[in-house]
Each structure stands twice: as C-alpha cells, then as structure tokens.
Image (cartoon, helix red, strand yellow):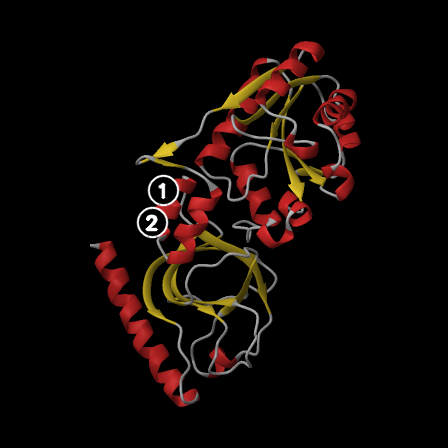
Amino acid sequence: MTILHSLQALGTVPGPVALAIGVFDGLHLGHQEVIRAAQEHAAQHHGTAVVMSFDPHPLRILRPASAPKMLCGQAYQSLLLERMGISTALLCPFTTETADTRAESFMDQLVAHSHPLGCVSVGYSWTFGKDRGGNIHVLMNQGQTHNFAVYGIPPIRDQDVIVSSTVIRDAVASGDLNKASRLLGRDYALFGQVKQGRQLARQLGFPTANVRPEAELLPPFGVYTVRVQIGDIWQQGIANLGVRPTIENEGAFPSLEVHLLDWSGDLYGQNLEVHLDHFIRPEQKFAGIDELKQQIAFDLQAARLVLSKQQK
C-alpha cells in the first residue's frame, strides 16, 4: 500500500481522485460504506480511490482530555484497507494550523492538489474545518462549484443501534467481543509485532509469542482462547492479555502472550493478528512461579476443552 502524508502528495495519484474522508478508527461497517462509495466512483470513472484520515485523532489537538483510545493502529488499518482493495491512503497530519483552516479553504486545497478531484465520500453527519464550519451541505455547494461528486453516507444501524466507534469501544471495554465483531463486520482481533520477551514462559514449558498490541483500547485483561493465521493455516491457541502481575512490576505495559497449541516455530519480528474468542478467566496475581505454572496447566486444559466443543 502507498501511504501519502500531505495534501500536496495527492498530485501523484492518477485521477480522477475519489476521496473517502474520515477518522476511520476501527474501519467498522459504517466506515466501510463510506469507502465503498469512493471505490465505486473510482471504478466507474477509471480513477483512484484514496482513503484519507488524520494523524493524530483531531480531538488530540482540539480537546486532548476527550480524545478516545484508538481501536486500531496504523499498521492494522493499512492491512484492513488492503483487504478492502484500497491501494492508496492519505494520512493527513492534524495540527493546530489544520484545526484553524476554514472548511472552504480546506476543500480548495483538495481541489488544487487533485488531478482532478472526482468525488468526496463522507458520513452524512461529518463536520470539518474551523469551528466545525463544514458539513455535507457545504461539501455539496463546493462540489457544484468545483465539479466533483459528493456522497453523504447515512448511519448504519444494527438492532436499532447506530454503528459507531464509540459503541464499539464500549463493547470492547466491557468484554462483549461478539457485539464488537458484529459492528465491525469482521472478527474482533488484536494486532501487533512479536517482541523478544524474558522467555519465562518457555522456561516454564509453555513457550509464547509476546505480542505488543497496537490498539490503545483493550478488552478486559485475562486468559482467552485465540486463533492466529500463520501463513495459510489457522492455528488455535491460548493467550494472556494483561500486565503479568506475578512477574512484572506495577505499571508494566500490557502485552498479549500467545501460546499456539501443537505448533513450534520462530515468530520474532512478525506481525500477528490475534482473534480473541472465548474468555476463560480474569488475569490475577499468584503467590509465586510454581502457582503460576500450575494455573497455566489448568488454563490449557480449559482451553482444549472449549476448543474441542467448538469443533463438534
């Protein structure tokens, strides 16, 4: 995937440029509809669909205390976009200068740097520009002036709930991963790189891949059954999400320790997409290593029992 980092870089994209604009945290069902509209326009007009988001999240600049914890890191977002068929993304730096730009001026820049701007696709209630002066009506007026199409995508509903990143964050934080998966339109997963750990689990006889999740918002800490794709094969396993209170000092960074059942290999440096399935128990602090080792053995038994029932 090609990732652009400035509005000026749009000039390198074969036009007409079909822009899908939003924050797109999580790339949920609503976001997918916004992006799909841009893809359809690009296909019909032999142009290029570009997904445009902002870094950091605008609230990090406008109201830092209200900024949400992100569901999806940039590397995982790029992977998910590639799966949707997107080959070009624009990660626009969001600064105080960006926040102070009037909506019309922002659109003038998009028009000036695209050759040409074919369409803009957004959520119907999306606002932009200084003092949130831009909305779908401003976009439509700009479209008439500069000859580009505008698609305002209405909210997507699920069981009378509007699909939004906020609702999904609440579901993840409460451990309702089935609901999160439904609203995302795919299985909820954590994504991150396998880091070199202390290899204590290996010494205990349970080797693990130590994954540092990209996501800022995590589900409840504890032990889960998981699925991980290694090459073309899905591997089942068990994972502990948390701060490992038995062996780490207070304030340790959360990690996801993944033990794949009946598998061996070197995963250091690889990015893993870990699908969390069944919650076995909360994370807890044990009296010592021996008690921890005994509990891991119990957890493995529980995981195998759960997985065997799922296969029937």
Residue 189 in the image, given as x and y percentages of width and height: 45, 52
| Snapshot quadrant of residue 126 | top right
Q: Which mark is residue 178?
A: 2
* Horizontal relation, residue 146 to residue 215: left or right: right
Mark 1 crowd level (few <14, some 14–19, many ≥20, 10 Å Cα): some
* Depicted 57 relative to depicted 33: above or below: below
* Depicted 238 relative to depicted 102: above or below: below
Q: Residue at x 24, y 55 (%)?
A: 311
Q: CA distance from mark 2 to mark 1?
A: 6 Å
Can residue 155 be seen from the camera position used here? Answer: yes
The one nearer the camera, 96 or 2, is 96
Residue 263 in the image, given as x and y percentages of width and height: 42, 66
Name the image quarter holding the N terminus: top right
Residue 100 in the image, given as x and y percentages of width and height: 75, 36
Residue 194 in the image, given as x and y percentages of width and height: 57, 63
Q: Residue at x 55, y 39 (%)?
A: 24
Label 1: which secondary element: helix
Q: Residue at x 37, y 64 (%)?
A: 224
Amino acid at the residue labelled 2: Asn
Report if the CB atoms under discs 2 and 1 are less than 8 Å apart: yes
Amino acid at the residue labelled 1: Arg
The one nearer the camera, 29 or 126, is 126
Which residue position is annotated with label 1? 182
Q: Which mark is residue 19?
A: none
| Snapshot quadrant of residue 304 | bottom left
Name the image quarter holding the C terminus: bottom left
In this view, the residue farthest toward the left is 312
Mark 2 crowd level (few <14, some 14–19, many ≥20, 10 Å Cα): some
| Snapshot quadrant of residue 275 | bottom left
Label 2: which secondary element: helix
